[in-house]
Image: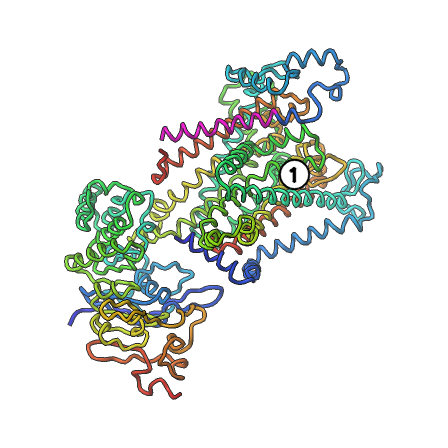
Amino acid sequence: MNDGMVKNNIILKANKNENYFAVVRRQFMKNKLAVGAFCVLGFIILLCIFVPIFSPYSMQIYFAENRLIPPSPQHWLGTDVIGRDLFTRLFVGGRISLGIGLLVTFINTLVGFTLGSLSGFYGKWVDAIIMRLSEMISSLPFMFTAIVIVALFGNSIPTLIATFAALTWPGITRIIRGQILMLREAEYMKACEALGINHFKRITRHLLPNLLPFIIVYATLNIASVILMEAALSFLGMGVSPPTPTWGNLIEPARQMVNLMNRAWLFIPPGIMIFLTVMCFNIVGDGLRDAVDPKSRGR
Amino acid sequence: MANKLLEIKNLKVYFMQDGMELKAVDDISYYVNEGETLGIVGESGCGKSVSSMAILRLLDSPPAKYAGGEILFEGKDMLKISNDEMRKVRGNEISVIFQEPMTSLNPIKTVGAQIAEAMILHQGLSKKEAKTEVISLLKLVRIPNAERIVDEYPFTLSGGMCQRCMIALALACKPKLLIADEPTTALDVTIQAQVLQLMNELKSSINASIIFITHDLGVIAEMADRVLVMYAGKVVEVANVVDIFEQAKHPYTIGLIRSRPDLETDTGRLEVISGNVPDLNSKPSGCPFHPRCEKAGPRCGKEFPPEKVFSEGQIVACWLYSEGGVGNE
Amino acid sequence: MRGFIIRRILQIIPVFFGILLLLFILMELSPGQPLSDLQDPRITAAHRERMLARFNLDLPVRQRFFNWIADAVRGDFGESITHRRPVSELITTALPATLTLSISAMLVSMLIGIPLGILSAVYKGKGIDTVFTIFAFIGISMPIFFFGVLLILIFSVNLGLTPVMGYGSPPPFGRNETLMQIWADRAWHLILPVSALGLSGAASYMRYTRASMLEVIHSDYIRTARAKGLKESRIIFRHAMRNALIPIITIMGLQLPGLFSGSAITEAVFGLPGLGGLLLQAVGGRNYPIIIGMMTIIAIVTLASALIAEILYAVADPRIKYD
């Protein structure tokens, strides 16, 4: 009983007053932890944009005599084995890691929304095919499949993005499909059907506004998990290949004993950046979920 | 003169939400005599359930806050006794029948086990003894095949059957007070009638006082000896059941009675009370009913009226009957 | 129940063959081939052709697909291109490390995550809940490999309490030791990897348990239990917990692919000889028989465990009657 009532309330709110998003924003602002995480995230993004622009050290040029300098006033985070400034590389790597996270999430949200609505709306064999396909993909461990695909097709950034998108769409597709199956039964959608409003219009005008909150929450959390996956894959040497830095391949030196024992500056900062960014996305996503879905509040 | 089994004095129950106090129950007083059935009637959100859940301190706190007043059950203040003492009262001396029979029973325990649990706890029966007791209870509430149903899970039963089980559960320890919180609202109309009939029949045999909460005046007419009318956290009128239907005083009670379909004097149209029940966070000042009241005057928005006692225990809180009236136009 | 299991197996079979087909298609579409001269310049064209023929890699993809299935049914998963050993043998050598790591990590996650989740829900909004929730966020957000590296850095490198890596002490050890000693040594080596994988899993079990428990705590039947006069402890353990844990069974089944992924990364960090390492070796040389064999085994394990989770769910929840 509670489920239906609360869900219907959300729907009503979203349709009745235009400023549903104002309500969500107010709810979100109340969650201090989430607001804090949001600010940290903004700061990290700004650093990723501006540090490489203003850094005196270039990405490409390196000096052999500057190899493996520990953190110092000239090189805030030290230099790597071939003398590149790690502070600069950290934020260039951030651009790539965040960029991949955003792009993959954008693609699979688009794919997930399309497939999910097709599946939810048309049912029957369309649904069966899409669901079996998503079952296939989600019953394979991501890491193994990704390693195989990347090894077969090469580890360029576009291949990686395609691989991540291809392996992560089932999640959002199921969410959208579930929501649509539920909303289809909602009174106002039945009214639309009775009024003869066509499928496309029903999806874009009436369903999309109601699904948007769920999509935004999903997307936020998904960026976090894509960043983690990319980092893990890069750590295994199957992600973005050097010299292009990402947070994942910046940690890779930790796999060598010498570095692990004596050169903590090589891998600690990128590790902290991944951890911090992912945690902020998770906290913001959680805060958003509580804000859009009163039922989950405080859970 | 009958003894008062339960007496509530100036009870205030507030809900804390976003730093605001929502006055769900705002300074109400009433009593229940031994052996009597008190009906509490009002629209949803008027505080009728909250006030009765407060008796057993069953509200989640926070957000609920018992902001003041006393709940005297056999002379003990239920708001002051320890948790352990409270647990000895719950299900034993006072028990509850809830609104949603299907969700009020634990889905993964058999109905028999759930009813027996209370008996084992309060009466110290063994599992075996409890089971025979449960079966006879189930027979008492007219459940067919009680020997089989006792081992069934709630989801295999219909809503009406579940509510009978809930009634059996409530009666398990022969309570002195039974709180029935809209026990028939979630049921189909025909089932409603059966359950009401059952409760009416049991009333005499169990010899307990009942607080019967409902928004349905028809149910009140069948069940209650005395009626309490609540509006937006306040008691607006109390009277015995005949007086409520024959000579209601408060404009809200009158409105409620007029808005019932009456088959005998059918005029073809139902009368309605215009407007809506106010939100708890935007409750009108003074008498909360005044924005919807046809007879309201300037004074009604300023101050809540004092109680005016009529003959035979009819009490009304309305400026119409108090000194000074509703004020000048 | 039996009908349900048979029906589910019938549903799983097409999914399984779909995965297999997908793998063959991927390999066919990918540029490059095994034994190309890019990987080893010494390989001559003639030698290469002989080798391809030997592994049937010169056949059209459709035929290879059906050949593989026909062989697999007889328990023959082919021969590794580089190792000259049967694929099944290589996989069974790598499997124990992965399974030991994954299963111990899963147990650790559940033993820590579920009780903390319940506590967190019961004391919602109190200090203890806040602390656990912060830990859960840290656990969910911490990359396993970074966590592993930190553990090595602290416990092995700085404190010298645990071995840095490996699945056991190097060879002289184990010749004269008893089985008990060998197992103790292994457990000693697995403490850090299991903690790394287990603690991050514990965080997500905690979140799920907390959410599930909160839902149950606010349900009508818990209010009924309270109205009966039951003690709070009995309400939590007898009424709420069982209901709250039923959905966790599903989570267990769903988390298995993630567990294998995590274990592949953990193996790499701690140098354990598991499936992850074998796969990384195999993909480098486009060792198709190993890739297919391993992915098949993993798919079977995850599909089977999802089925087992569904069956357990039905056993735990009387409302579910599969028939």
Q: Which of C105 and A23 is in front in this view?
A: A23
In the drawing, does residue C51 fall left or right of residue C199? right
Instruction: Residue C23: say if magenta.
Output: yes
The chain to which mark 1 is attached is A
Residue C153 seen in this snapshot: no
Instruction: Residue B240: say if magenta.
Output: no
Please tell me whether residue B69 is drawn above or below residue C191 in the rendered image.
Answer: below
Quadrant housing residue C242: top left
Q: Name the residue under label 1.
A: A230
Q: Which residue is drawn at 23% across and 62% down?
A: B210
The residue lying furthest to the front in this view is A196
Residue A243 seen in this snapshot: yes
Q: Nearer the viewer, residue A30 or A181?
A: A181
Q: Give the range drawn in magenta.
A: C1-24
Categorize mark 1 by other alpha carbons within 10 Å: few (<14), some (14-19), many (20+): many
Whole-percent x and y of residue A30? 55, 60
Whole-percent x and y of residue C245? 41, 42
Q: Nearer the viewer, residue A45 or B66?
A: A45
Q: Which residue is drawn at 32% across and 57% down?
A: B83
Please tell me whether residue A12 is drawn above or below residue C182 in the rendered image.
Answer: below
Instruction: Quadrant for the N terminus of chain B, please.
Output: bottom left
Picture colour scheme: rainbow
In the drawing, does residue B1 fall left or right of residue A129? left
Q: Which of C34 and C249 is in front in this view?
A: C34
Whole-percent x and y of residue A71? 76, 44
